[in-house]
Amino acid sequence: MKVVHIIEALGGGIYTYFEDLTHHFEKEIILQKVQTSILYSANRKEIDPEKVTQLFATIPTVKIEMRREINFISDLKALQKLVFELQKIKPDIVHLHSSKAGVLGRIACSFLNPKPKVFYTPHGYAFLRTDISTMAKKGYWYIEKFFQKIFGGITIACGDSEFEMAKQLGKAEMIRNGIDISAIENYSQAVDNTKLTIGIAGRITAARNPRQFNAIALQFPEYQFVWIGDGEERDEITAPNIKITGWFIEKKQVYEQINALDIYLQTSLWEGLPIAVLEAMALQKPIIATKINGNKDTVVHKETGFLYQELSELPVYFKILEDSKVRAQFGNKGKTRCKDLFNTTINFTALQKLYERYFFAAAKNFQK
């Protein structure tokens, strides 16, 4: 069975997702059943080309220029390249990741004969964005609906909230995002900060809401805040008690930085299912996160952390988590939840079985 993954947004949590996916599907026992190829774009600023080359060293890959923004000329070139490469591979299954890949990939697959089974994971629908107009949101919703109806395919939601939305647009399955818990927990060490240290990991972009993160830091000058990463909206970070680490080449450095926190704070405006939150949970950090889709799928309010809608809620939550014993209780419950629901070994095995189920069903129908 030949499976092709097409990725436009190879950055942030999706990079981590594919790092783990690659390790799973390159195993010898799985290679006997599934031959994986990856067509990807590396336009995101936080991606080191050398790291991508190392990541996909054991899996056939092709780099294809795709841009997040709509651009007729560049999109047409990307589409032509996708059709060309897919015709060479002749995949049985094509799995599309992110909205742009979902559009271009579906169109490209319509030119193939025989046609592969198409799956699509949004990793956070574009119509959930809050940095665009209401009209633009509606436009993205209708694009999702149109391409699902006209070109078909099955959505594989990465979390419970995304699954509920996907079912409204068409046929859907759910395989939750996951992390390699056994690898991450190796970086879990005791922390003894002189000040309560609160942080977030990821790109400094509108989606992560750096303006609110900055406002929170200004409201709590007695605490130390850390932004693990960098990004185009770093100018929004002005509070003197915020440290911006910049990007790290090695993932282990990110884990070490997350482990050094007392509390993980996710100020996102929209999410698919946030990998960084899962990593913090695996490192036994209590989570405080905005009460939005994605975050609600990871955090259990008052058990593994707190979900908030208004900044006025935060003083109570921070005060509760000043107690190291309470933080440990929340952190232990978060790690247990991670092991139960967000384990890559379990979830990627489920993904493989889902591919096989649809592949063999299609083969059986073809024989009839």
Image (cartoon, helix red, strand yellow):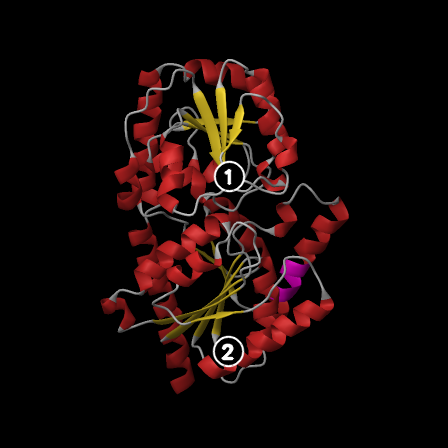
Question: Could you give the CA–CA distance between mark 2 and mark 1, rounded to whole angstroms?
Answer: 37 Å
In the rendering, at what x and y percent does residue 236 appear?
65, 32
Q: Residue 192 colored magenta?
A: no
Number of callouts in the render? 2
The answer, for residue 158, to whether it is visible in the render is no
In the rendering, at what x and y percent does residue 304 appear?
38, 28
Mark 2: secondary structure: helix
In the rendering, at what x and y percent does residue 325 appear?
31, 17
Q: Nearer the viewer, residue 359 or 105?
A: 105
Q: Quadrant of residue 70?
A: bottom right
* Residue corresponding to mark 2: 86
Q: Quadrant of residue 128?
A: top right
In the image, 163: left or right of 364? right
Residue plotted at (54% across, 54% down): 166
Residue plotted at (42% across, 25% down): 263
Query: If the image is split into quadrants, where does the N terminus sit?
Result: bottom left
Closer mark to the observer between disc 2 and disc 1: 1
- Tell me which amino acid carries mark 1: Gly
What range of the chain is rendered magenta?
143-147
The main secondary structure of the magenta stretch is: helix
* Residue corresponding to mark 1: 246
- Tell me which amino acid carries mark 2: Leu
How crowded pointer 2 is (Cα within 10 Å; few <14, some 14-19, many 20+) is rated as many
Q: Nearer the viewer, residue 16 or 306?
A: 16
